[in-house]
Amino acid sequence: MPRKLVVAQYMSLDGVIEDPVGMEDSGLGNWVGPFSRGPEGDRFKHEELMAAEMLLLGRRTYDAFAPVWPQITDETGFADRINTMPKLVASATLQDGPWQSTRIVRGDIAGEVSRLRQGEGGDILVYGSRKLVQHLSARGLVDEYNLMVYPVALGRGGKLFDGGQVDLALLEARPFGSGIMLLRYAVRR
């Protein structure tokens, strides 16, 4: 079965995905921090990562993750998996990728993703990387969205869908923890 490109995002009720943990100096702060996704939400995120064969990141998300994840250990294997799995980073400016198993794609990221999707294997998982996701979505390369919608409206900030229409089919809706909703969608072709 061909690989799927799966976008995993934390999202506010008003569609904002920008800077959920407050690491990007957006002024939005840590808007996911006051909420807990609970054990079921943690289990979902674990399974989501374990189903993926590789991680695709934009430069800003990579810059936030790369210094942090190699310092983390856990009993579930999540940190080990994210640290050792292949990572593609879309960037014209990043000079090197010191995080283990990183490859920088400086050119046609849409072409690279298209080629990867044709191959067999596990999912290509995208965390964060708003502009990259919008670029790939506009080219019809996103297959699924896993959205954890947090019970907060921010009133401003970068939104996931900030361009043309995207038609979706609901795959799953499930509540987690303190009011967080998982909404999984397939892109209708």
Image: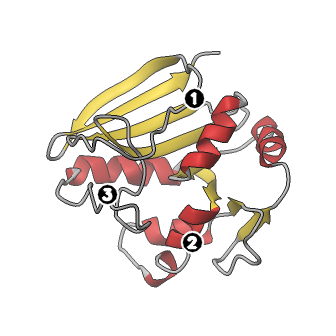
Residue drawn at (33%, 62%), measured in percent from left and top? 27
Assess whether mark 3 and mark 1 are in contact (beta carbons under 8 angstroms): no
The percent position of residue 152, horizontal first and vertical second, equals 21, 43
Three-letter code, disc 3 = Leu
Residue 97 appears left or right of 158: right
Crowding at dot 1, Cα within 10 Å, few <14 / some 14-19 / many 20+, comes out as few
Badge number at residue 25: none
Three-letter code, disc 2 = Asp
Disc 3: which residue: 28
The percent position of residue 83, horizontal first and vertical second, equals 56, 72
Residue 43 appears left or right of 5: left
Going from N to C along the chain, the mark reached first, 1 or 3, is: 3
Residue 156 appears left or right of 90: left
Residue drawn at (70%, 70%), measured in percent from left and top? 102
Disc 2: which residue: 63
- Quarter of the picture holding the C terminus: top right
Disc 1: which residue: 163
Three-letter code, disc 1 = Gly
Crowding at dot 2, Cα within 10 Å, few <14 / some 14-19 / many 20+, comes out as some
Q: What's the coloring here?
A: secondary structure
